[in-house]
Image (cartoon, rainbow, N blue to C red):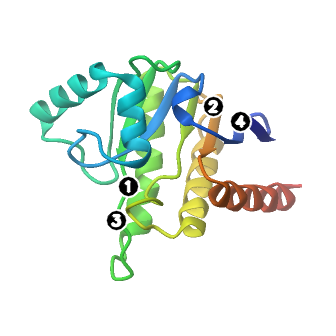
């Protein structure tokens, strides 16, 4: 992992594999079934091991899965993080006018769940930008704005790390964070 930004020591940008990150919690871009899938969801389930699936099945049995924009928490299993916060982002559609709000909710609800579990450091992947086809630039803007707004009114989270697996997302976040830093100076 390569640290690129350190915005007031509370927001960082890294390029790499979120499953290898040492943080209190990593966020999984899950689906509503919580049973694993492709992309980061599949990678987290594989790296964390069977315990994550078992805990997700218990959550499903208790509440029927996880709704879009909501978040649930499990152990991180075999990964260096303590927890995995599973959140479900929206599937992109030009006719879905609520997609922006649902994506923002996914970030906000993950952060609120982190606080409830005394998480100080949390890492986010690029939620909804894979098979859910959310435009990467729009998703990054929503992610950064939501996290920045949340951190401005809450000091319990010490660090939020945006972890980009691919170069394209990394460059988008890098540019947006540079603009944000410029506007704040």
| In the displayed structure image, the side of residue 150 where residue 47 appears, left or right | left
Sequence-wise, the earlier of marks 2 and 4 is 4
Q: Is residue 95 above or below residue 45?
A: below
Identify the residue position indicated by label 1 in the image: 89
Nearer the N terminus, badge 3 or badge 2?
Answer: 3
Q: Real-space Cα distance between discs 2 and 4?
A: 10 Å
- Rendering coords of residue 136 (x, y %): 56, 65
Q: If you read the primary sequence from the N terminus, does the residue marked by circle 4 or circle 3 appear first?
A: 4
- Callout 3: few (<14), some (14-19), or many (20+) C-alpha neighbours within 10 Å? some
Residue bearing mark 4 = 10
Q: Give how far across and how far down residue 105 sits, in percent.
A: 41, 53
| Residue 155: assigned label | 2
Looking at the image, residue 147 sits to the left or right of residue 38; the answer is: right
Label located before the other in sequence (4 or 1): 4
Q: Rounded to the nearest whole Å, what is the CA distance between mark 4 and mark 3?
A: 29 Å
Q: Residue furthest right?
A: 185
Residue drawn at 53 percent across, 52 percent down? 126
Q: Mark 3 near mark 2, Cβ–Cβ under 8 Å?
A: no
Which of discs 4 and 1 lies nearer the camera? The answer is 1
Q: Nearer the viewer, mark 1 or mark 2?
A: 1
- What's the residue at 15%, 35% (across, down)? 60
x and y, in percent, of residue 150 in the image? 57, 45
* Residue at the image position 53 percent from the left and 22 percent from the top: 24
Does residue 110 appear left or right of residue 164 in this picture?
Answer: left
- Residue under pointer 3: 91
- SS state under label 3: loop
Q: Which mark is residue 54?
A: none
Q: Secondary structure at mark 1?
A: loop
Label 3 – label 2 distance at C-alpha: 31 Å
Q: CA distance from mark 4 to mark 1?
A: 23 Å
Crowding around mark 2 (Cα neighbors within 10 Å: few <14, some 14 to 19, many 20+) is: few
Per the image, label 4 sits on a secondary structure element best described as loop
């Amino acid at each position: 992992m390569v640290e690129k930004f350190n915005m007031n020591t509370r927001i960082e940008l890294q390029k790499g594999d979120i499953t290898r990150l040492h943080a209190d919690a990593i966020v999984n871009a899950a689906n509503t079934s919580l049973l694993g899938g492709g992309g980061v969801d599949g990678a987290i389930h594989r790296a964390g091991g069977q315990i994550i699936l078992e805990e997700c099945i218990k959550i499903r049995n208790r509440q029927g899965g996880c709704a879009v924009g909501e978040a649930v928490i499990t152990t991180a299993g075999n990964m260096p993080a303590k927890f995995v916060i599973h959140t479900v982002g929206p599937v992109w559609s030009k006719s879905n006018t609520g997609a922006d709000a649902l994506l923002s909710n996914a970030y906000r609800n993950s952060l609120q769940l982190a606080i409830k579990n005394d998480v100080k450091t949390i890492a986010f992947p690029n939620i909804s930008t894979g098979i859910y086809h959310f435009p990467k630039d729009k998703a990054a803007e929503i992610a950064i704005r939501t996290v920045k707004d949340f951190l401005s009114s809450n000091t319990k989270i010490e660090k939020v790390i945006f972890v980009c697996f691919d170069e394209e997302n990394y460059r988008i976040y890098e540019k947006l964070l540079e603009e944000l830093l410029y506007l704040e100076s």
